[in-house]
Image (cartoon, rainbow, N blue to C red):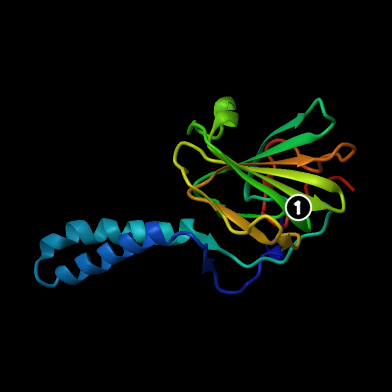
Amino acid sequence: MSNDSVSPRALRLARGVSPWLAPTATAAAVTAILTRRSAKWAFAAVPLAALTGGMLWFFRDPERRPGFGRLLSPADGVVQSIDPLQDGRTRVAIFMSPVNVHVNRAPAAGTVTSVEHVSGGFTPAFNKDSDKNERVVWHFDTPLGDIEMVQIAGAVARRIIPYVPVGAKVAQGDRVGLIRLGSRVDVYLPEGIQPAVTVGDKTVAGVTRIDRA
């Protein structure tokens, strides 16, 4: 995917990261000030500063120009599996690693008709049993019909934060939610629509086309 699809504007931070970032950044600042009194505080200040920098990178939320296609990837990551289902739909599962952007985007323009939180476990997202993990199930009413998207928590990512409520109208590529520290996002292609990606392909949320023309 060309870097031309990513806006050159300054990066922003994802909504919903304050409970994690604020305490870490505050502790880093306080211990950095205390190093002026005693160099021993550096043993705390240095790792806290590194952790703060890492979190700023993990929780980045870059501006993007939407790609072209009936369905765009809802997540940054790698296509983990493509599964034809008995109801005619095709599930495309995208694995998000901790270094990916964690903000998820609407695969198509439409109206949010359902946002359902489902309790579950925290198996690593690359494990086949992760289908039983904590998750949020989305449904969008779109020109293609109902589009289902599922945000799945993993072993590290244990909090999913929806950004938009039921009834909201979204444009294709709009931010709809966050999974802290990566995991997996599934999108279900309606019957008759073939995937344009294959297992192992890298995807960019709101940019990569996942349906075949």
Residue 164 in the figure: left or right of residue 15: right
* Foreground of the two, 166 or 26: 166
Above or below residue 130? Residue 100 is below
Seen at 12% across and 65% down, the residue is 39
Question: Image height check: is 88 above or below 117?
Answer: above
In the image, is 181 to the left or to the right of 2?
left
How many discs mark residues in the rendered view? 1
Q: Position of residue 203 (x, y in %)?
A: 68, 49
> Please, what is the three-letter code of the amino acid marked with disc 1?
Leu
Q: Which quadrant holds residue 56?
A: bottom left
Residue 178 at what x, y percent from top left?
A: 55, 53
User: Farthest residue in the left direction?
Assistant: 38
In the image, taking residue 191 as reference, residue 11 lies left or right, namely left
Secondary structure state at the residue bearing disc 1 = loop
The residue located at (75%, 38%) in the rendering is 198
Q: Residue furthest front?
A: 167
Percent position of residue 162, x then y: 58, 54
Q: Residues within 10 Å of mark 1 (few under 14, many from 20)?
A: many
- Give the residue number, with chain letter if any, for mark 1: 72
Give the residue at x 54% y 35%. 125
In which quadrant of the rendered image does the N terminus lie?
bottom right
Q: Is residue 121 above or below residue 76?
A: above
Position of residue 195 measured from the top left corner of the image (x, y, whole percent): 81, 40
Q: Closer to the camera, 213 or 193?
A: 193
